[in-house]
Image (tube, rainbow, N blue to C red):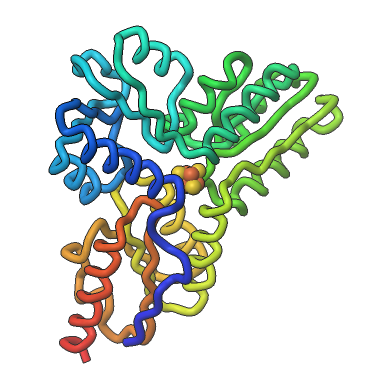
Amino acid sequence: MEIKLAKEMGFCFGVRRAINLVEKEAKQRVDTSITTYGALVHNPLVVNRMEKLGVGVVERGDMSQITSGVITFTAHGVTPEIIEEAKERGFEVMDATCPLVTIIQQAARKMVEEGYTLIVFGDRNHPEVKGILGWAGGDAFATMDINDLKEMRPPKRLGIVTQSTQILEKFREFVCQVHLHFLGKTKEIKVQNTICAPTTRLQGSAHELSQECQVIVVIGGKQSANTQHLADLCQENGATTYKVEGADELNPEWFRGVATVGVTAGASTPDESIQEVVRRLQALDSTLN
Ligand code: SF4
């Protein structure tokens, strides 16, 4: 069985930056309590590593559990109100929002200030999308379904941005549907493709891999949206796709009679998880053949 690796996979720049920031701070300030607002990344290995460094974590929406010290906002970003609340409670704020998410937040705010009704193409329950909506302020909402917009009174100006990790093909389809529905009713439609460059490269590599392999293993946390997007993309491309958090979830039966297996990983997956999966696949190969 040939094992092929995606040209680009694993930690993106924003996640790496957030982890480095927190690790550095935790090592330098051992007497200060550091708490992340929500898991730093959606990956249990990273969360455990942070625990060992003494970094706490509280659920998003529940700052009351923190008594003092540093509060860290994750790469996904938060609303301005949450930053304000942290300051009012007297916490020191360490903002690890990815600069590429900040660009989306600012684009969203600018569109709303200029009078656009804003649509964020993304999962409305995802922290990044909630943060973008918060920065947009007024007339903005999130959806990925054109049917949600059909009852809406056509606005004069309609703006669209996207969650950073969305799939370009799906965004393109959505934008076409919006144009079909609103052109002629709305004076102006402005679209800003805010899928980040690391996501585009990650998805491009996964796309290439899924065309070369019968089976694809996608590694990433169960809660990780970008990992799920990679898995969807590979599956839709015709490769039998399995999503795992780690090597222990690999089932030997998935690889019986398979000539080529591809490995890719979400932007929040550490190198250790990828290496473990590859080692396990190599071991399986020698027992299956
Ligand atoms: S996926 Fe893109 S926007 Fe999100 S943290 Fe990584 S680099 Fe930043």
Residue 241's image quarter? bottom left
| 136 displayed left or right of 112 | left
Residue 84 position, x and y percent, is: 42, 12
Q: Front-most of 57 and 189?
A: 57
| Residue 233 to residue 225: above or below | below
Q: Is residue 161 left or right of residue 282?
A: right
Question: Which residue is located at x 59 percent, y 21 percent?
Answer: 136
Residue 189 picture location, percent across and down:
78, 31
Instruction: Work out which residue is located at the far front of the displayed protein and give it.
Output: 28
Q: Is residue 148 above or below residue 281?
A: above
* Residue 12 x/y as whole percent: 44, 53
Quadrant of image for the N terminus: bottom left
Q: Residue at x 18, y 82 (%)?
A: 283
Closer to the camera in the image, 136 or 139: 136
What x and y, as percent, mark residue 124? 47, 30
Quadrant (top left/top right/bottom left/bottom right) for the C terminus: bottom left
Q: How many marks?
A: 0
